[in-house]
Amino acid sequence: MAIMPVFGQLVAWRMPTGFHRANEETQGTHYRFEALRNKETGEGWSQRITLEAEASAASDMNRTPLDVASDIATGFKQRCPDSYYGIELDPPAVDGYEAYAAVAGCGQLSGGKTAHAETALIVVVKGAHSYYTLQWSERDRAQATPPRIDADLWSGRLKELLPITLCDEVAGEKPPYPSCVARIRAHTGPATTSARRNHRSTDTAEVEARWEAIGFTITLQHYLSTLAAACDALPDAAAQPKGLLQTWQERGRNGSFLDASRMYQTALVTAVQKSNGEEAAQRILANQMALVRQQGDDEASKLLGDDLSRRAETCRQVRADLAAGQYDIGRDLPMYATLDTLVRELDGGGGGL
């Protein structure tokens, strides 16, 4: 799951396989996140996923998600009046919030090095304070006629993004935002956490839950490793008996959960290699680790900031939070039971608390 703090709420959706984070910025009241296909950059993209938001736009109660989507579609029409086409899709269920979904496309758009066709899935959700727009765009060769929009294809892509969830930010809560993860699980259940299961018959709810649990644990470890690289190098760190990461690993069951996650990751990748080949196994591993690095590095950078004069205080607060157990993988987290099972299996049925 990609979980982004945007204007007072956490916006969560499932990032499809094969995409990487390319850009994230806030300018005034406008927020924009962008992900591109792996190995693609800049203007030469073939597929792109964006999340955009306008702060306080939802205070205008006369507007609906349909109105916002219509404005986006109008933008398409103005750029290709002779080759525009659009269809509505069944809107996704976003617990407690209005949503609308559609697909709009142009046969020929100018801009960039060459003219091209472009089609976009548009999902608009009316949040508590803002409108959130999630789009999945694809480019193709330019044509004079409107594009043929495959409703089944785009409905399938919408399912790949589900569940889309809005959560209220919790003061002091840090990535990977366990309260929001718990809400997602409560409303989806382990059997419906991924639309990709429709396309991979070898996937099961158990494997999917374990893959997500180890992703959570390894991301948390990478996040703390990045913090440790900055904090353990500070002069006052010499007074600490142990490094930040070592301290975390020795607390509670964190180290056991991390070891079990690494071993299960290796076992699952090996199983994929045997059934689908080396390339498929390495692709799965690379996609997960790329997301781990992106999320861990980005969130650590946000916390540390660019002001080196304040870094020592930030690091002292991190150590205090760690000592208070805020980074522990405890029973209140939705992936605890899954990780506990992994540890028990590696211990031969014992070792669970």
Image (spheres, grey):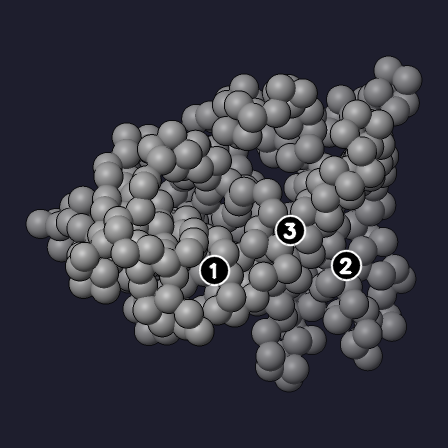
- Viewer-proximal residue, 343 or 75? 75
Q: Which mark is residue 291?
A: 3
Asked if residue 3 lies left or right of residue 112, the reply is: right
Q: Is residue 148 left or right of residue 191?
A: left
Q: Secondary structure at mark 3?
A: helix
Residue under pointer 2: 225
Camera-nearest label, 2 or 1? 1
The relative height of residue 97 versus residue 75 in the rendered view (above or below) is above
* Residue 273 appears left or right of 190: right
Closer to the chain start, of discs 3 and 1, is 1
Q: Position of residue 261 (x, y in %)?
A: 78, 36
Specify whether residue 268 is in view.
no
Give the residue displayed 43% in from the left and 54% down from the top: 140
Distance CA(mark 2)–CA(mark 3): 15 Å
Contact, CB < 8 Å: mark 2 with mark 1? no
Type of amino acid at the residue the image marks with label 3: Leu
The mark lying in front, picked from 2 and 3, is 3
Nearer-the-camera pick, 278 or 321? 278
* Residue occupying the far front of the picture: 144
Query: Which circle's residue, 2 or 1, is located before the other in the chain?
Result: 1
Q: Are there few (<14), some (14-19), or many (20+) residues within 10 Å of tag 2?
A: many
Kindly indicate the quadrant of the structure image that contains residue 228.
Answer: bottom right
**Residue in the picture at 53% in, 57% down:** 36
Q: Position of residue 296 (x, y in %)?
A: 66, 56
Q: Is residue 217 above or below residue 311?
A: above
Q: Which residue is mark 1?
A: 34
